[in-house]
Image: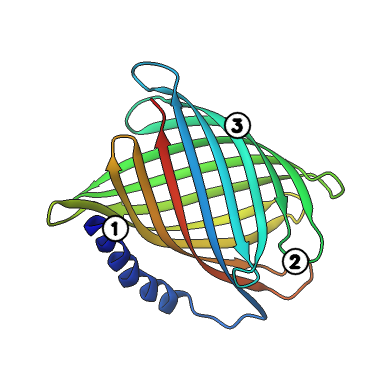
Amino acid sequence: MKNLLLIIVAVGIFVPIAKSQTATTRYDTDFQFWNETQFIFPLTKSKDWNFVLSVVGRFGNNVRTTTDARIGGAITKKVNKYVTLSAGYLYQVSNSTFVKKRYASRYIGMATFSVPLGHKFTFVNRDEVQYESRYSRPNAVVIRPRALIKREVTIGKTMIEPFVSWEPFYDSVLKGIARYREQVGVSHKFSPQFSADFFYVRQDETNLQHTPAGTLNGLGTSFKVTVR
């Protein structure tokens, strides 16, 4: 409980900073809550090969409606302590407009690079490419590079990692950046089998579809459970 309170306090410190740095005027707004839970199944004793089962739920319309539900799996390969590769599939049901559900199958390839910067700072670059089969809508290739900086911080006997990230979404159908996403939060490893992120998220839609640009703000959690 003490560790959890420390994490909540840390999130409270970083959220106002993120809001003040990204405050702009938008036409449409929403507040959401996001959660992703990953179940990690090691495929080798060294845990360099893993199968990851992901379950995602997002709740919008000011946390009154399920706006996004996803389930999928991926195979990951830890090449070394700096590079991890993965490939997988994700099925999505979304209702971002609160009017009509949309469905998609995502085929995903990803490469993650971690670079120590010194003074307990680490830069993480995650490059993701996904082919989206959108069924009744035109299919698309979406490119998502994510830049993240984190730092190890010890409070008492508890180690946490505050982080901040920025991620653009390039859509091949729209032929441009469809949205931007920023996150700020903290990570904590509760045990060798369980770790969690607690974060604030802001996502800005562009007007490439000739509709007013919109934004969402929200809070989220991300859990990682390693299954022995």
Q: Quadrant of the C terminus?
A: top left
17 up-or-down from 196: above or below = below
Q: CA distance from mark 3 to mark 2?
A: 27 Å
| Numbered label attached to residue 97 | 2
Q: Earlier in the sequence, mark 3 or mark 1?
A: 1
| Numbered label attached to residue 4 | 1
Q: Earlier in the sequence, mark 3 or mark 2?
A: 3
| Residue under the image location 66 percent in, 47 percent down | 142
The label nearer to you, 3 versus 1, is 1
Residue 139 picture quarter: top right
Left or right of 130? Residue 18 is left
Q: Are marks 1 and 2 in contact (CB under 8 Å)?
A: no
Measured as percent of width and height from the top left, residue 200 is found at 44, 65
The label nearer to you, 1 versus 2, is 1
Residue farthest along the bottom direction in this orientation: 25
Measured as percent of width and height from the top left, residue 182 is found at 48, 62
Left or right of 100? Residue 195 is left
Q: Secondary structure at mark 1?
A: helix
Answer few, some or many: residues within 10 Å of disc 2's Cα (few below 14, many 20 plus, some between 14 and 19).
Answer: few
The kind of residue tagged 1 is: Leu
Left or right of 211? Residue 164 is left
Q: Which residue is mark 3?
A: 88
Q: Are marks 3 and 2 in contact (CB under 8 Å)?
A: no
Q: CA distance from mark 3 to mark 1?
A: 32 Å
Q: Quadrant of the N terminus?
A: bottom left
The kind of residue tagged 3 is: Gly
Measured as percent of width and height from the top left, residue 164 is found at 38, 59
| Residue under the image location 67 percent in, 81 percent down | 27
181 or 171: nearer the viewer: 181
Measured as percent of width and height from the top left, residue 144 is found at 57, 48
